[in-house]
Amino acid sequence: MSRAGKIARRSFLIGSAVLAGGVAFGLYTVRRPHENPLEAGLEPGEVTFNPWVVVGPERITLITPHVDLGQGVAHMQAMLLAEEMRLEPGQFDISFGDPSPAYWNTAMGEEAAPFLSSDQSFSARTARTVMGAALKVLGMQVTGGSSSTPDSFDKLRQAGAMARETLRRAGEVRTSIPLDQLHCEAGAVVLVDGTRIPYTELSAQAALLDPVQDAPLTPRSDWRLIGQDTERLDILAKSTGQQVYGIDLTVDGMVHAAVRVNPRRGVLNSFDASTAQAMRGVARVLEVTNGVAVVADNTWRAFQAVNAIDCDWGPSPYPADQAVHWTEVAASFTQDRLDREWRHDGDVDAALTGDVIEAEYRAPYVAHQPLEPLNAIVQVTETGVEVWTAHQMPRFLQQQVAAVTGHDADQVTFHNQFAGGSFGHRLEFEHVKLATEIALQMPGVPVKLTYQREEDFAQDFPRQIGMARARGSVANGVVAAADIQIAAVSPTRSQMGRLGQNVPGPDSQIPAGVWNAPYAIPSYRVRAYAVPELAPTSSWRSVGASSGGFFGESFLDELIYAAGADPLAERLRLANDPRAVAVLEAVGEMSGWGRSLAANRGLGIAMVESFGVPTAEVIEVEATPQGIRIHDVWIAAEVGTVVDPIGFENQVQGGVIWGLGHAINCEITYADGIAEQSNYDWHEGMRIWQAPRIAVRGVELGGTVRGIGEPPVPPAAPALANAIFAATGQRLREMPFNKFVDFV
């Protein structure tokens, strides 16, 4: 039996313990709701029905606990609540709220369970229940993994319906009019004669009632906001420069800080700050973990002064030169480093006889590089700590800060902020911990730490480095077998290890996008090998699938061409999930697949599933005398229900640009233990004049609602590589592609 079967049996046993109230957590612990964090902070006259809604005499506040990193998730959460509460945009405020286990992520457990997303067997459902129960008990409040929409879709609608029905009953108490003669509309309870009682006038009556628990949800046919084009709540502020990000914040009495930390990730042997101390505006020079900090009267002066410090850096704890990193990855395809055999269909060894097609692929380290540099404001006092920054794991942040200062985690007050991008970068804590170290040495003074762009690159935790070795065969004009082995650093173990968390078992992100490919290849095997950690890595937009999708879909394309088959038709023949079939058919129709192309043009196709979302993409390129020009992209994704159509389109288009830009131009390489790329000119995204036309389609088959932040990224690189092959006959098996071809 395959290891997947053994995992399934283990999940069944653990799941049974959870569901029966056994040793894993206990039934009472799993079922017990978390306390409503809003109750303790209510102002006079305010009422809360659940952790997401506060109504008072002056305002209505909706809590949108998933932090907005530019992806529009605050708007999405607010629309789910507003839909059920019968609110209109402009009738409410939004807040990220305080960190709380009540905001535990209900959706991340599904991705963590080691089963195909299409697997609805008892074992698969039990494993997802186990994971979800663990996340609830731990109170895991996380934004990431394209989980915000699936996490929010049911529970925020239920929260809004609960608030609506409780307010309607408050209207009944106020007027003595039977409940069935009252309805809610545009932020008010409406009487039969048209009289409107605003929700804000009903908060006192509502506070005396028990919240309605069995509130009906609005049927899809009556949705006003969900699935409709709505103007994002932040679009005016962002379009006019009024949106406040963490980097814009000021606090009374605040000082500014900058740091230089060992770019080799080693220790600081010594430093000479005499020049910096004499510079204008400098207040203090402080030592921090593996580096130095300057405190000054503005950010620019802090930058200039910290750069003037002469530092003697210790060596790196990982190989100093990039070539050694690749050598270590290549040496990891061994039995002792086998992390797991994730899939084994058919008899692969028997099928790989005779003419065998072989290929090797590489995916480099790449940086996160959000436009807003990392920043944080921290103030430390005897009684507690206050933190202002944007972060994806608020409760972990409280723990990390408390570990630095010696306070309890509940003594850390955290104010989450809008972020100018993340792509996984704001899952890390180093900049917050450094700001806390500085503030700890200046009790009572708010310290604002801002990273220089060069420091941001030097201290980044990039995407994992990885390599794939693939073998396959074809027979009778179709794909017969594929054996794909992937060796990569484990991003999950690296990331969670920095939090002191042990991650047992294999890392599903090493083979992501390959082991879960929704294809019924007769003989198909996927093995993952864990490379011992080299440079520390972290989650990067779409994590393992960003490289795994390139490996798997590039090799499948090679096999299809070797078989003499059509790339779309053969994928459709192999696809064994109706959702995968639907997105492939959609992009085929959108792109006019099969039409005659002009000379030197080619179409490439790829379909990758990540975070439960099958996403298919077709790219048309032209080989010009100056280089490759990308003309058009057609992309379709199946997410069950498109909650926010404009946000969906924006996210997909952004994911395509992100995926293409990094596939073409970007890598992080190490020399003398230091990342050689220090700014955007060395790690260049796609330029606006290179950007193609992008047509987007959301396929809605009505199943599980999924997120779309990450799934558009993985198919971009293989679709482009396959298009370049179709136009030129040249196979690209390593990113970035600009090492081998020019782009215009």
Image (cartoon, rainbow, N blue to C red):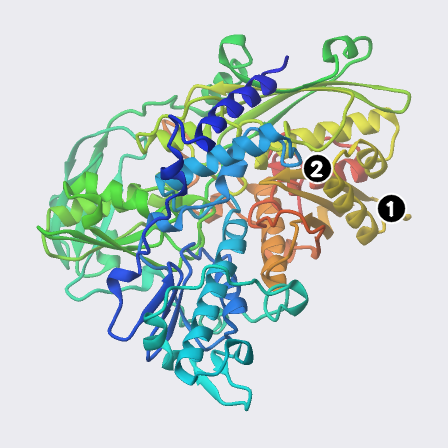
Q: Position of residue 136 (x, y in %)?
A: 40, 41
Badge 2 crowding class, 10 Å Cα cut-off, few under 14, some 14 to 19, many 20 or more, is many
Residues under labels 2 and 1: Cα distance? Answer: 18 Å
Badge 1 crowding class, 10 Å Cα cut-off, few under 14, some 14 to 19, many 20 or more, is few
Which residue is labeled 1 in the image? 599
Above or below residue 479? Residue 143 is below
Q: Quadrant of residue 687?
A: bottom right
Question: Would residue 135 be found to the left or right of residue 385 on screen?
Answer: right
Which residue is labeled 2 in the image? 721
Foreground residue, 659 or 398? 398
Please report the residue visible at 86 percent of the width from the left and 35 percent of the height from the top: 566
Question: Would residue 661 be found to the left or right of residue 326 on screen?
Answer: right
Looking at the rendered structure, the number of numbered marks drawn on it comes to: 2
Q: Circle 1 — which element?
A: loop
Q: Circle 2 — which element?
A: helix
Above or below residue 365? Residue 593 is below
- What kind of residue is marked 2? Ala
- What kind of residue is marked 1? Ala
